Image: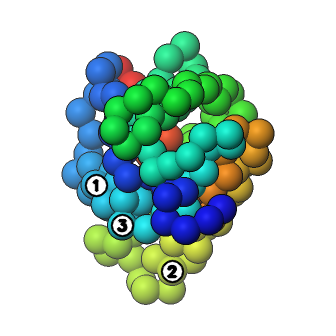
Amino acid sequence: MTGNTQRIAKIALDERGLVRRSAQVEHERKVAIYDLIEENSFAVLGHDGPYDVRLSVEENRLMFDVRAEAGTELIRFALPLAPFKTIVRDYFTICESYYSAIKSATPSKIEAIDMGRRGLHNEGAALLRERLAEKADFDDGTARRLFTLLCVLHIRA
């Protein structure tokens, strides 16, 4: 990847059909989008950036609608969500434990839960990079933020 043209300049989520999210999940969504726009390394193979990306879920697939920054359609590709089912479910479970723990648990218990949460997050990000390797190239930080957004979109009505 070269220079700063190989990046996501804008990202949006298709939120039709999503349930109302908790304050924690909404905060994670906002932080992931903000951090992603501030710093990312993302290149769609065969297409120059910067990119305007819209993420949605259709028929149990994460859809990437990638456009040039000016709005011209570049490519649309799908990522089956089935391989992420267990990681996402486990991630949501450990996040609930983490949010409960920060209210009353000891610092060492919170740290242990957070380590598990970060481990699952890293595992999901690595799987995302692996599954998209033939479509796009992106760094670990970008993968982590995209995995957060995948999880947000996974919360369906």
| Residue at mark 2 to residue at mark 3: CA–CA distance | 27 Å
Q: Residue at x 68, y 40 (%)?
A: 46
Which image quadrant for residue 83?
A: top right
Left or right: residue 23 versus residue 99 is left
Helix, strand or loop at label 1? It is: helix
Total label count? Answer: 3
Asked which secondary structure carries label 2, the reply is helix
User: Residue 8, position in %: x, y?
Assistant: 45, 52
**Circle 3 is placed at which residue position?**
38
Q: Quadrant of the N terminus?
A: bottom right
In the image, taking residue 80 as reference, residue 9 lies left or right, namely left
Report the amino acid beneath label 2. Answer: Glu
Q: Quadrant of residue 142?
A: bottom right
Q: Which residue lies under the disc numbered 2?
A: 111
Res. 99 visible in picture: no
Q: Which amino acid, by three-letter code, is at mark 1?
A: Lys
- Residue 138 visible to an observer of this rendering: yes
Comparing 34 with 89, the one in front is 34
- The reply to whether dot 1 and dot 3 touch (C-beta < 8 Å) is no
> Picture coordinates of residue 109 (x, y %)?
50, 78
- Tell me, yes or no, whether the two marked residues, 1 and 2, touch with CB atoms within 8 Å: no
Q: Name the foreground residue: 73 vs 65.
A: 73
